[in-house]
Image: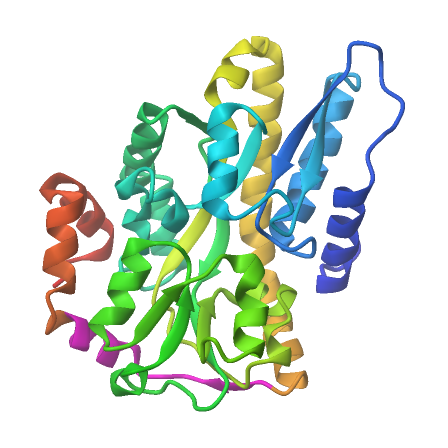
Amino acid sequence: MRPLTRRSFVASAAAGVTSFALLRPALAATYKLATNLPAGHPMLARLQEAADKIAADTNGEFTLRFFPNSQLGGDLEVLSQLRSGAIQFYPLAGAQLSNLVPIASLNGVGFAFKDISDVWKAMDGEVGTMVRGALRDSGLFVFDEMFDNGFRQITTGSKPIEKPGDLAGLHIRVPPSPLSTSLFKAFGAAPQSISFGEVYTALQTKLVDAQENPLPLVDSGKFYEVQKYVSMTNHMWDGFWILANQAFWQKQPQATRDIVAKRFREAALAEREDLVKLTGSIITKLKGAGMTFVEPDRQAFRTHLDGTPFYAEWKERFGAQAWATLERYTGKLG
């Protein structure tokens, strides 16, 4: 097996989102999978592998066509398309899903998880079970295993973020998520919700001074061209749930559902390992592109939050039971 490199991922993902078998049996059907991610993201490489295996397992009768880079619209617009049945599959992070199901962003509580092992204990455990139940109650079908989107880091163009006070007054892009907005307001920043596909332009035109995303998105979004510093805050963790239109999914034969669920599960577990392996090479690339990395005192940020109403407010919004479930994996918050 060839060694894992970012180049091999990009090649695989780019091939996946641009080429599918053109000749299929007469009864074959092609379904749409939309995503806000660029074609080079590791998750899309693994999803393409899954799509290839699904097509083979179903003798070409179930194929997927990918629409990356927000081709079909912003997150909330495409989520509406998914719910109406205009598209069939949509990977979406909990932060964005919280606009429909508030508890979906529970895993993104600021400075909650110490490391990725704690994340998977929670998301493959009771926290994940609780979130999936809420999503399914909302009329969506959601697959069991999350893909890793990584811990979020802050990038800036003019100054590094080294301590909580550095965030005061900072105009920073955040996803359309109440939790993200609330977190940065607690630090005195000025967060602005902007769809991912518009972030590069917002940074380039100085509409915002900063943004926050996991490193693979800093790389694939080419933010190194318009940002100078990376502050490794690990301030939030989020992953992607693979969603399907529920009516569409229920109409599929059980054998087909079993195949798709199996291949998506394999893809998710493989992508989690991929992301860990790729992080080092991405850091090297971003440094080579001129970005300066900063290791801030994360405990100072957590201590600052303890002195604000942030944790108490979100405990009330999520509910005592959900908050207690989260704290089983994170320890006491606030």
- Residue drawn at x 52%, y 32% as measured from the top left: 81
Relative to 26, is 49 above or below?
below
Q: Is residue 65 magenta?
A: no
Front-lying residue, 164 or 158: 158
The answer to whether 177 appears left or right of 294 in the picture is left
Q: Give left or right: position of 10 versus 253.
A: right
Q: Is residue 163 visible?
A: yes
**Residue at screen point 61% across, 78% down:** 224
Residue 306 rendering spot, x and y as whole percentages: 13, 70
Q: Is residue 312 left or right of residue 14?
A: left
- 251 versus 149 height, above or below: above
Q: Residue at x 82, y 34 (%)?
A: 20
- Residue 296 covered by magenta stretch: yes
Q: Residue furthest bottom?
A: 159
**Whether residue 301 is situated above or below residue 137 in the rendered picture:** below
Segment tinted magenta in the rendering: 291-305
Residue 2, picture quadrant: bottom right
Taking the spot 33% from the left edge, 27% from the top edge, the residue there is: 138
Please indicate whether residue 59 sits to the left or right of residue 74 in the image: right
**Residue 72 % position (x, y):** 61, 42
Residue 210 in the image, given as x and y percentages of width and height? 45, 77
Disc count in the image?
0
Colour setting = rainbow
Q: Quadrant of the C terminus?
A: bottom left
> In front here: 103 or 268?
103
| Residue 71 position within the rendered picture, expressed as x and y whole percent measured from the top left | 65, 47
